[in-house]
Image (cartoon, rainbow, N blue to C red):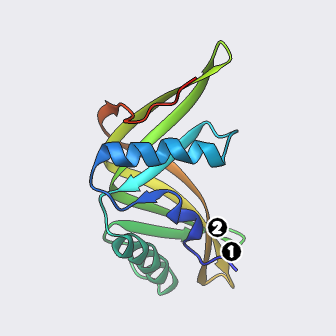
Amino acid sequence: MANEFEFLDKHYDPTDIPEVAAQTAFERFGNFPNAHTSTVIFNIPWQTLTNAINQAVLTYVNGGVASGTAAATLSANGQQWNIVLTGLQYVNATRTMVQGRPQYSIDEYRNGSVFVNAEAIGGQLLGEVVHLSTGFGTWVQTLELKNPPTL
């Protein structure tokens, strides 16, 4: 059985080096050949990231006011958590096809926000994270891959 953060782990790299996170984002395309984007959060301890998600859910369940780096809401049917994480560094890789060949672009962002969707168990507990999408952030730079693909 998957734990609640198994999916999120695929969008995370413990590095503080943007180029390393960019390489991780690029390598994710190999496992998901039909994907058009790949996002990797970096430069934050894993425990800090997962604790923020857990705290956001607990705050919502207990009727508190969201504060800190994450906020959660429950979908109208009570089956999904919608969580926003703020203040993150991430890279976002995109793949486009040009004349039948893939081309990649990877951008670094800081002070960014990402949106996470997770299953809600019994309308109160955090279940498995099932989706991550980028929101917005301050663009820093376009990154070059250290090991670009050979075609």
Q: Tag 1: Cα neighbours inside 10 Å, few (<14), some, or many (≥20)?
A: some
In what element is the residue under mark 1?
loop
Say what secondary structure mark 2 lies in: loop
Camera-side residue: 17 or 80?
17
Position of 121 with respect to 55 (left or right) is: right
Pick the front one: 100 or 74: 100
Q: Quadrant of the N terminus?
A: bottom right
* Quadrant into which the C terminus falls: top right
Q: Quadrant of residue 50?
A: bottom left
Seen at 39% across and 69% down, the residue is 49
Q: Position of residue 93 (x, y in %)?
A: 48, 38
On screen, residue 16 versus residue 29, left or right, reads: left
| Residue at 70% over, 39% down | 34
Instruction: Identify which amino acid the numbered label 2 is placed on.
Output: Ser
Q: Are marks 2 and 1 in contact (CB under 8 Å)?
A: yes
Q: Specify the farthest residue to the top.
A: 99
Above or below for 6 versus 10 = below
Numbered label attached to residue 75: 2
Residue 27 x, y percent position in the rendering: 53, 45
At label 1, the amino acid type is Gly
Residue linked to disc 1? 78
Q: Nearer the viewer, residue 38 or 122?
A: 38
Task: Characterize the local packing of mark 2: few (<14), some (14-19) or many (20 or more) Cα atoms within 10 angstroms.
Answer: some
